[in-house]
Image (cartoon, rainbow, N blue to C red):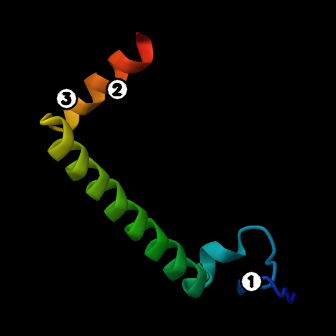
């Protein structure tokens, strides 16, 4: 199966074959997904630090402020 959208797909296997396969995951695609997850986590942490600097509240306090803002 070839696809030109930039992802490398492995051929479709019969049901349950990946459980006994020595290489059950597409490691190239998994590495890209994990890289994206790590970068998004770093952005979230940075947003929490910036929010703490702006509001003077910790992460739990920021959640309380957000809830008060949303609930009125």
Quick one: label 2 or label 3, which is nearer the N terminus? 3
Foreground pick, 66 / 11: 66
SS for callout 3: helix
Quadrant in which the C terminus appears: top left
Which residue is disc 3 drawn over?
Answer: 61
Residue in the foreground of this view, choosing between 3 and 53: 53
Return the residue at label 2. Answer: 66
The residues tagged by marks 3 and 1 sit, at their Cα atoms, a distance apart of 44 Å
Residue at image x 19%, y 29%? 61
Question: Splitting the image into 4 quarters, where does residue 39 fall?
Answer: bottom left
The answer to whether marks 2 and 3 mark residues whose Cβ atoms lie closer than 8 Å is no
Which image quadrant for residue 38? bottom left
Cα distance between the residues tagged 2 and 1: 41 Å
Q: Please identify the quadrant where the N terminus is shown.
A: bottom right
Report the residue at 25% width, 32% height from top.
Answer: 62
The residue that mark 1 highlights is 9
């Amino acid at each position: 199966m070839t696809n030109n959208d930039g992802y490398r797909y492995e051929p479709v296997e019969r049901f349950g074959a990946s459980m006994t396969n020595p290489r059950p995951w597409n490691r190239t695609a998994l590495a890209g997904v994990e890289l994206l997850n790590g970068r998004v986590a770093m952005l979230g942490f940075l947003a929490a630090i910036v929010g703490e600097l702006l509001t003077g509240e910790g992460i739990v306090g920021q959640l309380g402020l957000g809830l008060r803002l949303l609930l009125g």
